[in-house]
Image (spheres, grey):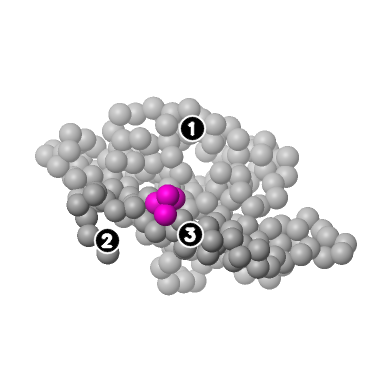
């Protein structure tokens, strides 16, 4: 399904007059999906947002998920096609969007939000924190805004990172060890628990850069 939004005066006061929104869903059927990457990722100059649940898994969206060869075989044509035509994934990688009602099923990143380079100018945030709606899929909030009103992102000021303070904290980090007889799932869960600890510790103890040399320190 596709919807066109026409803005004669320009989307967000820019030169783009057309915004197209796609909603794509595919039912798994062997090694194919009913929505072709060729149809979903054409090259257009106007702003384009794709919201999709095509039952595909890829390391770009969930690097900690142990993917099968079939997962890679099915998802790679879509991600390769999207990359070749300068589409970007808006999801925060590794943030789950589906939580199965079946207790022994692992959460997954199935609901993908993808934007072409024209729409990426307006992208502000992607957030899956809306209240539950009775589905096993999470409702998403995507905020678009005029580029002129978006402040530049504040990077981390690595020059002032306090290694004397951080080094002992890194040494004291504890990680969940896999079981003595690990399975693919227990190793997966152990890795998921351990991976975020190091970057979180470093970034939370590193000051952000000031927007300019004239900005206030706070």
3D distance between C-alphas at marks 1 and 2:
39 Å
The percent coordinates of residue 23 (x first, y second) are 42, 47
- Please report the bounds of the magenta region as a residue range: 156-160
Q: Please tell me which residue lies in front, 96 or 150.
A: 150
* Identity of the residue drawn at 19% across and 42% down: 11
Please state, as top left, top right, bottom left or bottom right, where the C terminus lies in the image. Answer: bottom left
- The residue at which mark 1 appears reads as 83
* Identity of the residue drawn at 22% across and 60% down: 216
Q: Secondary structure at mark 1?
A: helix
* Identity of the residue drawn at 24% across and 49% down: 212
Residue 130 versus residue 141 in the image, above or below: below
- The residue at which mark 2 appears reads as 217
Q: Which mark is residue 162?
A: 3
Q: Please tell me which residue lies in front, 31 or 142.
A: 142
Q: Is residue 217 left or right of residue 109?
A: left
Q: Are marks 1 and 2 in contact (CB under 8 Å)?
A: no
| In this rendering, the label closer to the viewer, 3 or 1 | 3
3D distance between C-alphas at marks 2 and 3:
17 Å
């Amino acid at each position: 399904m596709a919807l066109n939004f026409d803005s004669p005066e320009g989307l967000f006061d820019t030169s783009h007059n057309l915004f197209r929104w796609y909603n794509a869903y595919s039912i798994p059927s062997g090694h194919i999906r009913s929505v072709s990457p060729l149809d979903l990722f054409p090259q257009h100059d106007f702003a384009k947002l794709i919201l999709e649940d095509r039952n595909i898994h890829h390391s770009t969206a969930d690097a900690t998920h142990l993917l099968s060869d079939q997962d890679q075989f099915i998802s790679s044509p879509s991600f390769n096609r999207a990359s070749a035509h300068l589409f970007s994934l808006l999801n925060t990688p590794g943030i789950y969007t589906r939580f199965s009602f079946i207790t022994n099923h692992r959460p997954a990143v199935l609901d993908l939000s993808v934007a072409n380079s024209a729409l990426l100018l307006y992208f502000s945030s992607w957030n899956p924190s809306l209240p539950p709606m009775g589905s096993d899929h999470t409702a998403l909030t995507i905020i678009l805004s005029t580029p002129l009103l978006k402040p530049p992102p504040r990077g981390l000021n690595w020059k002032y990172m306090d290694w004397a303070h951080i080094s002992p904290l890194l040494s004291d980090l504890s990680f969940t060890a896999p079981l003595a007889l690990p399975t693919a799932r227990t190793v997966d869960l152990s890795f998921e628990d351990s991976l975020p600890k190091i970057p979180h510790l470093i970034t939370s103890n590193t000051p952000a850069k000031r927007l300019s040399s004239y900005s206030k320190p706070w």
